[in-house]
Image: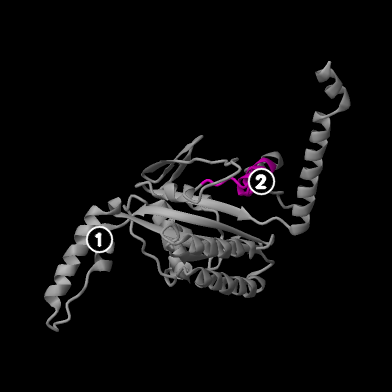
Amino acid sequence: MFKKRQKEKPADKPLLTKAEKKKIDRIVKTARKDDGIPRTAQQTIPFERMFADGTCRVRDGYYTRTIQFQDINYQLSLQEDKTAIFEEWCSFLNFFDSSVHFEFSFVNMAADAESFEHSIRIPPRQDGFDDIRAEYSQMLKKQLAQGNNGLTKTKFITFGIEAASMRQAKPRLDHLQNDILNNFRRLGAVARVLNGWERLRLMHDLFHMGGESKFRFDWKDLPKSGLSAKDFIAPSAFAFNTRTCQIGGMHGAMSFLAITASDLSDQLLKDFLGMESSQIVTMHIHSVDQNKAIKTVKRTITELDRNKIEEVRPDRALCSVA
């Protein structure tokens, strides 16, 4: 007997052809590719990771720290004291070699009235002097309402080095940090190192100058929340135009000043910072290698000598006499 041959079922057609699969894979690969263009507010903030000790990994192989320092009475000092302070300041700047990048940041920012009032409040102690404390606190509140338009003025220096890893960067950053603090001490300026939480709070305050957002951050919240430190400091959005910018609900303008004068007064920076408005003045400084600097100076001198010779050539002299 012959069994009836069953009719074979046609194979299921693939949902996508090979060409379509290749096209989708190419689109996914392009979408995952990091082209360096930030597409979120968090990606716009230019650092990778902040450590609790205050070290920030800005990018792979570059680490920074920040020191806050107080002002000194330079303008009111005698001329001899000004000369000594200036010489110490020159020594301070010459301390940084070409391997250290550093910048000065002068921040004038509207203070949070509630937190600032809390910081100057003198609590009672029930020792018979509470009336004096209350009167003094009231006087400070009046001064707060009348002076500086509610501005707080702070100054920072941020220094950074190139290193292959955090383990290699930390010893040198510690050494530089101690030397910088000693240099400030010789200048008579009070200085302290900002830890990671304080640096994040500073960036948060810069991104939220209007005071519409409070800084609420704890290192313990990072693992369980799945968020990064940038999520706690980033504004709602960034928008940059030719000269103006928008950070969250705040609008601002940026200016670049190229100073070509042969002589500068020490009053220049003071005049900038004396303006009663929220502003940030930064000075980016990079020391030049000594050998490279000497070559540049020699090349400039040679060029000047050549120009002098061109100006007093004999043929030109004869033409001028004739």
Q: Which secondary structure dominates the residues rendered in magenta?
A: helix
Quarter of the image where the N terminus is located:
bottom right
Which mark, residue 60? none
Looking at the image, can residue 222 be seen? no
**x and y, in percent, of residue 3 in the image:** 72, 52
Few, some or many residues within 10 Å of mark 2 (<14, 14–19, 20+): few
Q: Is mark 2 on a helix, strand or loop?
A: helix
Query: What residue does disc 1 label?
Result: 114
Foreground: 288 or 235? Answer: 288
**Magenta highlight range:** 22-39
| Residue 169 falls in image quadrant | bottom right
Q: In the figure, residue 155 lies in which quadrant?
A: bottom left
For badge 1, the amino acid type reads Glu
Give residue 139's quadrant in the image: bottom left
Q: Earlier in the sequence, mark 1 or mark 2?
A: 2
Instruction: Give the residue at x 51% y 48%.
Output: 265
Above or below — where is 188 with respect to 41?
below
> Rounded to the nearest whole Å, what is the CA distance between mark 1 and mark 2?
55 Å
**Rendered location of residue 66, percent (x, y):** 52, 64
In the picture of the structure, the residue carrying the numbered disc 2 is 25
